[in-house]
Amino acid sequence: MNEAKSQLAKLLAQEGVEVVHDPKMDTAAFDPMKRILYLPVLKDMTGDTYDLFVLHEVGHALYTPKDGFHSAPEEKGQRYKGFLNVVEDARIEKKIKRKYPGGRSNMIRGYHDLMKRDFFGVHQNDVNKLGMIDRFNLYFKCGLALNIKFSEGEMEYIDRGRELESWDDVLDLVEDLWEYAENEEATTDLQEMLSLKDVNFGDQDDDAPDIEYEFENGEESDEEMEDEGEGKGEGQGEESDEEGDEDPEDIFPGMTGGNEVSEDHNIMQQSFTDKAFRENEKELVNTQVRGDFHYTTVPEIDPSMFVCDYKTFIDGMIKQSEEVVSHRMGRGYHGYYWNNYQWESLEHFNQVNKPIISYMVKEFEMRKSANLAKRAKISQTGILNTSALYKYKIDDRIFKSILHTPEGKNHGLIFYIDFSGSMNQILPDVISQAVLMAMFCRQVKIPYRIYGFTNGYQNKLGKLLEQKYREQDDNRVVNRYNIKKSDMLSFKPGDLGMDTSLCLYEIFSDRQTGSDFQRICRAFIEHPKYGSTPIPMGGTPLNEAILNGIALCREFRKTYNLDIVNTIFMTDGDSSSNQRYWKESEVGPDKGEYGEYGNFNSRNDTIYIKDRKSNEQIAVTDTKIRHWGWAFTKKLIELYKISTGSNTIYMNIINRVEYYSGEKANINWYDLKEKIRKDGWLKTDDEGVDAIFTILSRAFKIKTDADEKFEKVEAGGKIGTVRSAFRNMNKNRLKQRFLVGNFIQEIA
C-alpha cells in the first residue's frame, strides 16, 4: 500500500490524527491523548473494503467519546453494548460522509462487498424477519439495497437515527430501542432460524434462488453470495428443563453479557448482525505479516547546519588547495594522478566550451519562445473595430482582438554530486559537466545550487562544535559522536537516525560573484593535475543528503518564489546504510554516544517515513527487487518529491552494465546493455522518480576529436566533405554535453 498517496491518510492529517498499522492487532484502537489511530493490517489494503474500514474508524476517532468505543466495557452487558455499537455506527458514519463526501461511494461499495461475504450473517434469509435493531443496523449500513420494511411506529426510530448528532442523542435512542426490543416478539421464521444451533446461513440448496443486492450507486451484484463465514442460530431463549432446549448464551456466546439479569432479557434484546459482523471482522485481518512495522519521521533540523557555504568553501578549502598547487608548481611537480588530464588551464576550458554554451543558451531561448507562442491565445475585447465594420455581413470579427501570452514559469536547479572515494577517477569529467551546467544557469539567470556531498566537518555544525570544544579543551577531538552532548541538534522520538558527519559543500551558486565563480572553476579544472582536490573524498551519505535536502529545497523555492524546482542526485553507488531511529523510551535496544535508538531491517520490515511539515508519508515495504538499498533510497527520493513538489532526477554512474544497474534503471539489464551503447547513457523512469539516467563513466568525457577533424578540412575542399565534417562537429558538441542538453529539454 502506498500510504503517501492514500486519500485517507491525507484526511487524517488534516485532523491531526496519525494512522499506525500494527500487525499484532486484530481490531482498531484509538489513543485520544496521542491522537493515534491503531489499525490492524488488512488482507486488502487498497480496495473499497479498506477505505470503508478506515473511514469508519476515523469517524470513531473524531466523534466517539471514550466510553463509546467497541472495546469499552458496558455495565449493562454485551447485549446492550451491541445496541450502542449499532446506533453509534449510524451516527459517526453519517458525520464522516458529511465531512468527506468523496468517501461515500467507497463506503457503499465496501458494504456491498461485505454483504457478498455475508458479514452480517443474514445470507439467504429474509431480512424483514429480523428484529428492529438488526433491521436498523442493516438499513443505515446498506441503505435501500435490501428493501427493508418498517412499520409506521418503527419509522420514528429510523427518523431519529437520521438526525443523530451528539452522543447524548445516541444514548437516548438506545434506551428507547432497548425498551422497544423488550416488548418485541420474534416472528415464527426468526424463531426457527435461531433454533438451529449449527445452521450455516451461507449454505444454499441447489434450487435456492440467487439473491442480488442493488445498492445506492446503481451497482448490482452479478455473482452468487459467497459463504465466507458461518452464522449461528439460537432458540427462543426461554428457560426449560426439557432435553434439547438451548440457552441463547450457549448459542451466541457473550450476547447476554454474562450478568445476573440476562435471563430476564427478551431474545430480541440483542443484535445478531452486529455480533456476526464483529466475529467476521477478523477475516479481514492479515495474520501472515512479514517483519515489523516502524513509524518514523524526517528530523526537523536546521538544514544549513550540514552546509559548507561557498564563502567558507573558498576561504578554507579553495585557499588551502591553491597553496598546495602553488608549492608544487614552484617545484615543477604536476600530473600526480592524471598525467593525461584534458584541460591545460581554465582559459583552455572556456575557449572550447563557451561558444557551445552560448549556442545552447540561444537554443533554450528559442525553445522557450516557441512554447510561449504555442500557448498564446487571441480573444475579443468587446470594443468595436471601426476599420472592420464595412465587412460585417461577411465576417463576424468586428471587435478588436488582443493576444494573451502566458508568462513562463520560474525554474530553479539543485544539483547534488557524490564526492565519495569511488568517484576519484571520474570526478574531473563530472566536474567539467557541472561547470558547464553552472555556466548555462548563470547566462539564462536561473537560480541554482550545486552541492558536493560526502563526510566532513567543514560545515556549519562542525565549525560550531570546533569552537565550542576548543573553548572547553584545546585538545578535544571534534567528531560526530559528540553531537548529542552538544545539544546543537535536536532529535525527537521517531526521527530517522542521521549520519551527522554529512557535509554539503556549496560548490556553485547564483549568489557567487563572477570572480568567486572563476576562482572555484579554476580550482576544479586546474588543480587535479597537481594532485590536489578542493574537497576531501569520504563516504556516500546519500540518504542523509536527501532528508536534509527536503528543508533546503523548501527554503530555496520560497527565497526565489519558484514555480518549478528540478533536483538532481548524481552518484556512482548506494548510500551508506543507516537503519535506525530515535526511541522515546529511556531504555532502548542500544545505547551509546548517540543515545537510544531502535533498528529496522528495510529488507523485511515495513517502514513508514513522514515529513511533518508537509504531512506527506511514504511506506518502505517488502520489495521484490534484490537491490534493497536502492529500494530504500528510491522511497526517500519519492518523499522528497511529494514533500517539496520538485522534479526529481537520479543519475547512476556505472563502469559497465550489471544486473543491479538494470534494477536501478527499472529495465531488464540485457535491454539496458543494448540501448546504452549508442549514446553511453539511457533515460528511464520509475514510480516516485521523474527520471533515472544510467550513465557510463566514459560518457562524461568531453571529446574534441570531431572539432579537430573539422579544423583539418582543407580550404577549397569538396562541399560534401565540409558539410559532413561540420554536421559531425555540431552533433558531437551537443552529445558530449548531454547533461546541459537534457536539462534544457526539461525546462524550455
Image (spheres, rainbow, N blue to C red):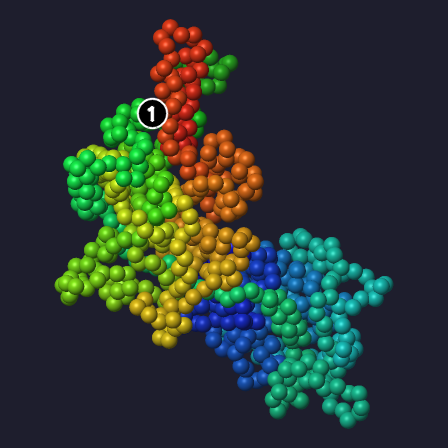
The answer to whether residue 193 is left or right of residue 705 is right
Q: Is residue 621 visible?
A: yes
Q: Nearer the viewer, residue 389 or 560?
A: 560
Q: Is residue 178 above or below residue 681?
A: below
Q: Nearer the viewer, residue 482 or 310?
A: 482
Q: Nearer the viewer, residue 85 or 164?
A: 85
Mark 1 belongs to which amino acid? Ile
Check disc 1 and report its element: helix, strand or loop: helix
Residue shown at the point (72%, 76%) measured from the top left = 232
Q: Quadrant of the C terminus?
A: top left
Residue shown at the point (81%, 61%) measured from the top left = 209
The answer to whether residue 712 is left or right of residue 106 is left
Q: Is residue 48 above or below residue 727?
A: below
Q: Quadrant of the N terminus?
A: bottom right
Q: Position of residue 382 (x, y in %)?
A: 40, 25
The answer to whether residue 334 is left or right of residue 118 is left
Q: Quadrant of residue 112?
A: bottom right
Residue shown at the point (36%, 21%) measured from the top left = 707
The answer to whether residue 593 is left or right of residue 729 is left
* Residue located beneath label 1 in the image: 356
Q: Position of residue 479 (x, y in %)?
A: 26, 61
Q: Position of residue 543 (x, y in %)?
A: 39, 53
Q: Is residue 236 above or below residue 734?
A: below
Q: Is residue 235 above or below residue 648?
A: below
